[in-house]
Image: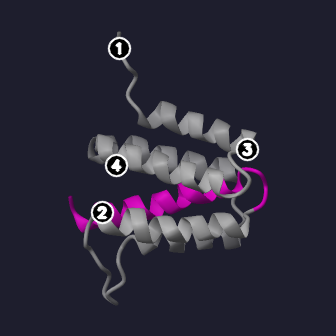
Amino acid sequence: MKPHFYKKLYKHIGVLLYAIAKADGKIHDKEVKAIQQIVVEDLAPLEDSVDEFGTDAAFFAEFEFEILRDREISPQKALEKFLAFAKEQDKNLTPQLRQLIIKCVEKVAISYRGTNKAEAQMIEVLKKHLLPVEKN
């Protein structure tokens, strides 16, 4: 896939991770650390595009997270922004990417005192949009 897609993907994953971390109204240090770990361990290995400064494009997720954190965007607006992106990019989101996105969100949710009700609700909405419906 094209580096341009990955930059957009990482940016929107950052939006989504922000939504989950902020779901309970406060972003905790353990959630920030979980996001930093996700970027390095889960996102950076996906592909090898870098920006003009040699920074792995996966760090766009962390940059976007910090931007939204500074702007205090509502978690619901952030989730809606990610879902709009996912709908727009539906054909580019492979089953593996979809599973990775869910895995990353769940890691953030459990990082501070386990998954709370607000986070669980967001994860369910996300799964409805990202995962195909099983047909019997």
Q: Are marks 3 and 2 in contact (CB under 8 Å)?
A: no
Residue at the farthest top position = 136
**Residue 111 on image: x %, y %:** 64, 57
Q: Which residues are magenta?
A: 1-26
Residue position marked by numbered label 1 in the rendering: 135
Question: Real-space Cα distance between discs 4 and 1?
Answer: 21 Å
Mark number, residue 1: none
Residue position marked by numbered label 4 in the rendering: 97
- For label 4, the crowd category at 10 Å Cα-Cα, with few meaning under 14, some 14 to 19 and many 20 or more, is some
Between 49 and 83, the one nearer to me in the picture: 49
Badge 2 amino acid: Leu
Instruction: Give the mark nearer the N terminus: 3 vs 1.
Output: 3
Residue at the farthest bottom position = 53
Badge 3 amino acid: Asn
Between 87 and 129, the one nearer to me in the picture: 129
Question: Real-space Cα distance between discs 3 and 1?
Answer: 30 Å
Look at 28% across and 44% down and name the residue there. 94
Residue position marked by numbered label 2 in the rendering: 46
Look at 32% across and 81% down and name the residue there. 51
**Residue 63 on image: x %, y %:** 52, 74
Question: Real-space Cα distance between discs 3 and 2?
Answer: 29 Å
Comparing labels 3 and 1, the label whose residue is closer to the camera: 3
Question: Real-space Cα distance between discs 4 and 3?
Answer: 24 Å
**Residue 44 on image: x %, y %:** 36, 69
SS for tag 3? Answer: loop
Residue position marked by numbered label 3 in the rendering: 116
